[in-house]
Structures are given as C-alpha cells and as structure tokens.
Image (spheres, rainbow, N blue to C red):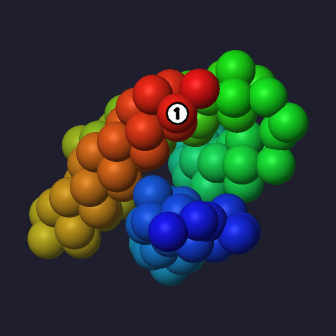
Amino acid sequence: MAINSFKEIIGWQKAHELVMLVYKTTDTFPKHELFCLTNQIRRAAISVPSNIAEGYKRRSNKDSVHFYNIAEGSLEELKYQLLLANDLGYIPAEQYKTLDDLSEETGRLLCGWIKSQKSSA
C-alpha cells in the first residue's frame, strides 16, 4: 500500500495524538513554568510529528531518514521532560503512565518506519 500523505504514517498519527495529550496535560502546570518546562515539553512534542512530516516530503531517502532521526531525538527529549515534570509533581502518576506508554508506542512505530525506509532505499 502506497502512502500518499504523512498523515497516513501510523507513527505520525501516534505522535500527533501524543502532542494533543501533552497540550492537555501541560495546561495544568504551574503558571511559573509557562515559559520554562511547559514551553520545552510542548516544543519537543511538536517536533516529533513535525519532523516526520518534513522527512516524508524530502526528495531523497537519506534526507527523509535524517528528519525521522531528528524526530526520534525529540521524542527522547520529551520522555525526559515528562519524567522531570512527573518527579516535580506536575503530572499525576496515572497521567504520566499514559503519556509514557504513548511515547514508547510512538517510538516503536517510528523506529519501524525508519527501518522500512532504510530498506527501501
């Protein structure tokens, strides 16, 4: 099955779902974190599906994989920031587990996507 849009990439779909949940979660963070941790978490989260979308449209496989790798890096950054927010008591344990599980699933899907793109080169 040919993919005609970045929106059809399952890893992108999960990353977008993660961004939506991150925004909902960070709405409850303390106001003094608005320009610090809240902003950093949101930027890292947005970077994941954004780089998948950009990579999808690149003309060479090498360029595409480069952007997918950046998305992986942003995802790892996000995982740490969510852990920090949890440790600071900004995210309830159950919500953190949901975010952590979704970020792990996104990572597995992204890794699979990258492998498939490398093998089709």
Q: Hey, which quadrant is residue 95 in on the image?
A: bottom left
Q: Is residue 28 left or right of residue 57?
A: left
Q: Determine the residue positioned at 59% across, 65% down.
A: 2
Point 70% across, 20% down: residue: 62
Q: Residues within 10 Å of mark 1 (few under 14, many from 20)?
A: few
- What residue did someone put label 1 on? 120
- Quadrant of the frame with the C terminus: top right
Q: Position of residue 120 (x, y in %)?
A: 52, 33
Residue at 53% across / 63% down in the picture? 9
Q: Nearer the viewer, residue 47 or 88?
A: 47
Given residues 25 and 77, the one toward you in this image is: 77
Residue 26 at x, y percent in the picture: 51, 67
Q: State whether residue 29 is above or below residue 43.
A: below
Q: Relative to 47, is 96 on the left or the right?
A: left
Question: Where, by quadrant of the figure, is residue 38 drawn?
Answer: bottom right
Left or right: residue 27 versus residue 80 is right
At label 1, the amino acid type is Ser
Quick one: 112 or 71, which is closer to the camera? 112
Is residue 121 positioned above or below 22 on the image?
above
Residue 110 percent location from the top left of the image: 42, 45
32 left or right of 99 in image: right
Q: Is residue 41 visible in the rendered structure shown here?
A: yes
Q: Residue at x 40, y 32 (%)?
A: 115
Q: Nearer the viewer, residue 108 or 120?
A: 120
